[in-house]
Amino acid sequence: MSSSSLSIGLSALQAAQRGLELAGQNISNVNTPGYTRQRLEQAAQASTAVPSMFGRSTATGEGVAVIGTTRIQDQLLEVRALQSRGAASAATFVANGHSMVESAFGEPGDTGLQAGLSEFWSAWGDLATDPTSSAARTSVLEQGGRLASSFRELSGRLSTQWGGTREALDASVATANRLTSDVADLNDAIRAAKVAGGSTAELEDRRGQLVSQLGDVIGVVAQPMDDGTITLSVGGSVLVSGNHVSSLAVTGPGTGPGTGPVAVTFAAGGTPLTVTGGEVGGMLTTLSDIIPSVLTRLDAVAAGVASTVNARQAAGYDATGALGGAFFSGTTAASLQLAGLTAAGVAASSAPPPASDGANADSMAASSELASGPDSLYRDLVVSVGVQVQGAGRRADVQSALAGQAESARLGVSSVSVDEEMVSLLGYQHAYEAAARFVSVVDETLNTLMEMAR
């Protein structure tokens, strides 16, 4: 029994005290967002006795050493949760994009384009029953003007949605740039703290929260490095390495679908970045695919209306006996409008005066039933939009469920369990009491030895 025994007891007291403090730290942060529970790392201290050829040491070691603390994480679950967040965010924004498009159509309804087409063809049917009526001719023109206006308004709503999404994309990329800059700063701070031998747990927790946000925004992939930093990449391209950041920018048309696609690029060299995850990936899909494809099909419907009506007009005779002129001008939904006909210019008859049979107007009204006519094209478009909304919604629900499961699995490992911490707290409490009792016994024993030597 010697003073080394007191050193052993002291190391045990210090280790138990550190354990109690760490359990308290975990318990106090049980509701702190982004906090990762920590575990005390200990190791037995070997004896420092120097062996010799003929000597024998009975030393049992010199107590315990606290090596440090470890954040409890499963790297596989962390990667899975981060990837799931990006996929779920992208799927949600794609579903939102489809829903926005569907709301722009307003179908079925009395104010939708389908109702406008029906009223337009119905006006031609009314004219067929009374081809000499100026009121019926005026009604055809009015309904045609309303129909053209409906096409322009629908195209305008879709373009407005495109512009709003484009502005949101700029904001999201700016957010991604801010977050990557913050991650780089924390990388630098964590590396410096590790070199100095300090604790980095809280800094790593803050960085983890930023990385999770980046997963939602742009779908990053994080790779831990040996020096404590992490490397962030998107689509195989590195955004953050150590304290170096590659800023991003948005290129392409800014006010509506036009020449060239919208893309996210590196601000320095303009190199395109492949982004499929996060809200940025969902917005790019909306801007480059969802809205443009619907506008293209809507333009085809508008062109079909113009060509069908103008062709039938050219085959008939107006009130003056002349062949009918163009009814519509423009070949897209945004440009469709009346060509400037008067009521007398509406070609209702299939033969010149004095015939006035209304057969041409009747054929015009029957255009609504053409198998490949504009009405059929529009119905197919509306059905397609509805199917895409349902499909995108289901995919978003599935991805959200997968993300929730991945996050639950991650938290099951890294989050604080009060029950576990209570057990740990009691364990360290008993260890501290036992160490204190050991020190007391050593002290009493040393006192007895000293009394015997007197």
Image (cartoon, rainbow, N blue to C red):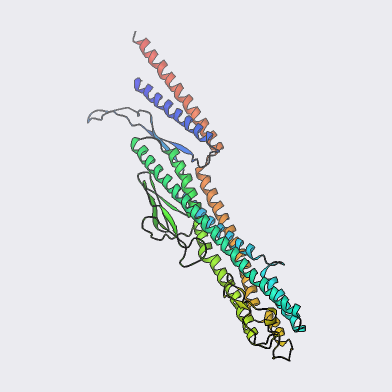
User: Eyeballing the image, is 445 above or below 151?
Assistant: above
Q: Residue at 23% x, 30% y: name it.
A: 52
Q: Quadrant of the C terminus?
A: top left
* Residue 83 rendering spot, x and y as whole percentages: 48, 54
* Residue 117 rendering spot, x and y as whole percentages: 68, 74
The reply, left or right, for residue 122 in relation to residue 395 is right
- Residue 382 in sight here: no
Quarter of the image where one finds residue 297:
bottom right
Q: Nearer the viewer, residue 98 or 441?
A: 98
* Residue 61 rendering spot, x and y as whole percentages: 35, 29
Residue extending farthest to the top is: 454
Residue extending farthest to the left is: 53
Q: Nearer the viewer, residue 383 or 296?
A: 296
The reply, left or right, for residue 383 in relation to residue 199 is right
- Residue 342 in sight here: yes
Q: Quadrant of the N terminus?
A: top left
The reply, left or right, for residue 21 in relation to residue 51 is right
Q: Nearer the viewer, residue 255 or 40?
A: 255
User: Eyeballing the image, is 241 above or below 288?
Assistant: above
